[in-house]
Image: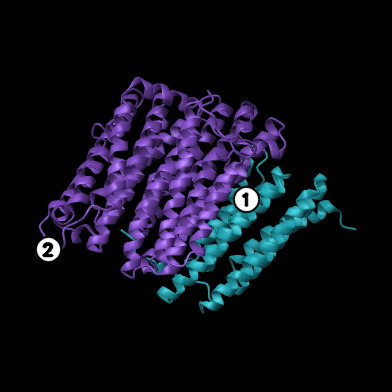
Amino acid sequence: MTPLLLFACLLLAAASAYALRTASRVRGVSLAAAALIGGAVIVAAFSGLTGGPVPPIVGWWHADAFTWTLVALVSFVYVAAAAVSYRYVGVEHHEGVLTLPQVRLYFCLLHVFVLTMLAAALADNLGVLWMSLEGTTLATTMLVAMYRKDASIEAAWKYVILCSIGISLGLLGMLMFVHAAALGAGLSPEEALSLSALRAHAAAFDPALTRWAFIFVFIGLGTKVGFVPMHAWLPDAHSKTPSPISAMLSGILLNVALSGILRFKAVADAALRGTAWTDGLFLAFGFLSVVVAAFFLLQQRNYKRMLAYSSVEHMGLMAFAVGLGPIGVTAALIHTVGHALVKPMLFFGAGEIMLAYKSTHIEDIREAKRRLPITSALFIPGLLLILALPPSALFVSEFLAIGAGMQAHPWLSLLLLSALAMIAFSMLKSVTTMLYGEAEAPLETAPERWNLTHTVMAVQLCAAAAFGIFALTPAALRFFSVVVRSLTTL
Amino acid sequence: MISLIHWNQLFIAGLLLFTLAIFGKPRLPAVIRHFALASLCLTGLTVTTSLLRGDAHGVYASLGTFAFKVIAIPTILLYAMRRSRASMQVSFYLRPAATSFVVASVLLAAYLISLRPAAVPFLPIALVLLGLSLMIMRKDLSSQIIGFVTMENGVAAYGVLTVGGIPLLVEVGIILTVTAGAVLMAVLSRHVQEMYATGDTERLTELTE
C-alpha cells in the first residue's frame, strides 16, 4: 500500500461517516475500516522492519526503521481507539450525550486524524511534514470541542491557538533550515525541502543559522509535544476530549511530534559537528517537564488530567533520555513504544469510569473496585506498567536513561528520580482513593459486564507486558540499535 | 519611473507599517482592514521578489496569498463576528503609551536578532514577534486570530525573502492549511461568544488550576 493509496482509503473511511444513515452503521463501518486499514499498515510496517517487501515509498515520502516503528504504533493505537470508540460513542449516543451529526463528525475526524499522523510520520518533504502536523491540530480541535460545554470549548480554543502558534514557529525554523541549505550547500529550494537532502548536506550549513533554525523547530514542535513551559494546552485538551481520542492524543500524537524534532536534531548535530548543543536543550526541557508534571500531579483532582500530566512527564523523560547520547536515544525509543502501548489503555479505562460515574473528578469516584471490577482489574496493572514496574518496558528504558544520566549528570538524575518517586506516589494515591475509597452513600448498580473496551485493554496489557519482556533481550537491543542509526548522523 | 526594486522596498515598508497600525486601532473592522492591507503588501512583495529573481512561479503563488489572506480570511472573520454579534470594540491589557513601548522593544529585539545569524532579514522576525505581542496584549478572541495570521505573514515573508522557489503545490498547501486554521478559529470564537456572551479571553477561566 503506497502512502497515497493509504491516504485515499482513510479519506474514504472518513467520508463513509456521512454516507451512512444510522449511528450504529457509522460506528460499525468505521471499526471495520480501521481494522482493515490499520491491519494492512501494521503488516507493511513489520515487513519494512524485518527487511521484507514493502511498497515503494519515494518522492515526498521516506521510510526507515524509525518511520516503520512509528507507523506501526500509530496503526495499533488507531485500531484500538476505533474499537473502543465503537462502544464509547455507542453508549454516549444511546444516552443522548452525542447526536447523530456529532457521531458522524467524530468518526470522520478520527480517520482524518490518523491520516495526518501517518503523513507526518512518513513525510520527507518539509512542507508536507508541516501541513500534516498542523493537520493533526485542525482534525482534533472539533473533537476536543465535541461536548460543546464551556470547558470543552475553552480547551479547544487554547489547543488550536497554542498549537497553531507553535507549529507556525516550527515552519519558520524549517524554512531557516532550507535557507541554511541554500546558502551553505547550494541546494535549490525544491531539493532543500527534503529532510534526507538536509541530512546529507548538513555539514555545509552555517552553524549560527542552524542553531536559530533548531531553536524555532524545537520550541514550535515542542509545543505540540507538550514540553513545559509550552504544555498549557495539553491537560485541558486531553481531559475534555472523548476518552478514545484522549488516548490517541496522549498515546501517539505526542510521539509523532517528538519524532519531527528528532529528525531535525540529526540535521542540526551534523551541521554543528557534535551533539552537545542539542543534547543540552533536550536535557533542560526534559528535566523541567518531569519536575513540573510531578508538582501538578501532587495536587491533581481530575483523573483524566492526571493521565495527561503523566504524558507530560513521559515526554519529558524521553527528551531527557535523548539528551544523554546513543544509550539515551535507545532508552527513549523503548520508552516511546512502551508508553504508546500502555497510556491509551489507561485512557480507555478512564473512559469506562467516566461512563459509569459521569464525572472526571477523583472526589466523585469511590468504590470503583466494587462497582467496576473488570475495569479496575485491568486498570491497576496498566497503572503499574506506566509507573515503570517490571515487566514494563518503561522499567528498562528508565533504568537505561537514569544509568546513563548518573554518569553524565548525577545531581540532575537524582532530582529526576525524586520527581519520579513523587509521581508514583501521587498517581497511586489518587487511583487507590478511586478504587477503594468509601462512598458516602451505598452504591447500588448492576454488575459490570465484559465489553469490547475490556477486550482491547486486555490485548494492550498483554502486548505491553510481552514488549517489556522482549525489551530485556539482546534481540531488542539489536533491533533498537538499527532504529537509532536511522535517527543519528554522527 | 519607479523601478521594481523600489516597489519591492515599498511593499516591505507597507507590510511593516500596516501591521504596526493594527496596534493603534480600537475597533475590530479597522484591525481586520489593516491586516488585509498588510497581506496585500505581502502579495506585492511576493510578486516583485519573484520577478527580481526571474522566478515566474512566485507570481502564481501570490494569487493564493491574495485570494486567501486579502479576501477570504478578513471576510470570514468579519462574517463570524457579525453572526455572533460580537462587540466591535477591542479590549486592551495595556495603555497606548505602554503598547508603544512594547512595540518599540519588539522591533529592537527583531533588529538585534537579525544581526546575529547570517542573512536573517529583519522584517519576518519583526512580524512574527509583533503577531505574538498582539496575541498577548489584546484580550479579545478576534485580535488573537489576527495575531496568529500576522505571525504567519512573517513566516511567509521569510520564505519569500530568503528561500523563494518553493514548489507551487507545497506553497498552496501551506496557505490552505493556514486558512483552514483561521476558519476553525473563527468558528470556535463564535462558539465562545455564544457560550460566554463575550469575546473576552479573560473569561476563559474554567480550566485554570
Chain letter for mark 1: B
**Do the residues bearing badges 1 and 2 touch, measured as CB atoms within 8 Å?**
no
Which residue corresponds to mark 2? A443
**Quick one: A65 or A6, which is closer to the camera?**
A6
Q: Position of residue A91 (x, y in %)?
A: 31, 63
**Quick one: A287 or B65, which is closer to the camera?**
B65
Q: Residue extending furthest bottom? A: B85
Dot 1 alpha-carbon crowd within 10 angstroms: few under 14, some 14 to 19, many 20 or more: many
Q: Residue extending furthest right? A: B1
Chain B takes which shade in the image? cyan
Which residue corresponds to mark 1? B155
Q: Are marks 1 and 2 on the same chain?
A: no
Q: Position of residue A417 (x, y in %)?
A: 26, 34
Q: Position of residue A369 (x, y in %)?
A: 15, 52
Chain letter for mark 2: A
Q: Position of residue B128 (x, y in %)?
A: 59, 53
